[in-house]
Amino acid sequence: METLEKIFIDFIKKKGLRYTPERKTVLEGILSIGSHFDADILYDFLKNKREDLSMATIYRSIPLFIESGILKKSPRSRGREQYELIYGHDHHDHLICLSCGKIIEFKHEIIEKLQNEVCIHYNFQLIDHSLSIRGYCRDCRTKKQETLT
């Protein structure tokens, strides 16, 4: 927490902003959730910690955490914008269940190698990429099969 907090404090000070108790609470929530989340999940998680925290604070804070390099937009799930903590985490891609919204992270060396080869072939400098595969997770497929039998 201390390293991320310092990174964020330095970032917002350079922007001429203050590190408020509300922003500290939002950062603590992001770190505590530790997985993919949307603004509603973060708000629900934090409203018991700080009753005075508003949804507007969440929506105003998220872009600052993205710009600072702490958070990243993640593939949408169930029509909602998702976010994930990226600072200190390795690159990965996503499997997204269209039924339950579950997001499964994966990394596959062959996929990474192929993407790099494509960039080399087209003389393209890779900065960032994301791969999202949408379908149905094992649990949802099993539930669907059980209702059919």
Image: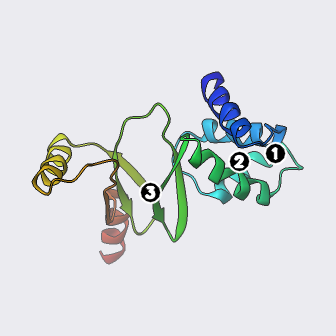
Instruction: Determine contact: label 1, label 2, CB under 8 Å.
Output: yes
Residue 145 horizontal/vertical position (percent): 30, 70
Instruction: Determine contact: label 1, label 3, CB under 8 Å.
Output: no
Left or right: 54 in relation to 78 = right
Amino acid type of the residue that numbered disc 2 sits on in the rendered structure: Phe
Left or right: 121 in relation to 133 = left
Q: Nearer the viewer, residue 24 or 52?
A: 24
Residue 146 horizontal/vertical position (percent): 34, 69
Residue 49 visible? The answer is no
Left or right: 23 in relation to 89 = right
Label 3 secondary element: loop
Residue 45's tag is 2
Earlier residue among tags 3 and 2: 2
Residue 48 horizontal/vertical position (percent): 81, 45
Q: Which residue is mark 1?
A: 48
Residue at 82 percent of width and 56 percent of height: 54
Crowd rating for badge 3 (residues with CA inside 10 Å; few <14, some 14–19, many 20+): some
Residue 102's tag is 3
| Rendering quarter of residue 108 | top left
Q: CA distance from mark 1 to mark 2?
A: 7 Å
Amino acid type of the residue that numbered disc 3 sits on in the rendered structure: Lys
Amino acid type of the residue that numbered disc 1 sits on in the rendered structure: Asn
Residue at 15 percent of width and 44 percent of height: 113
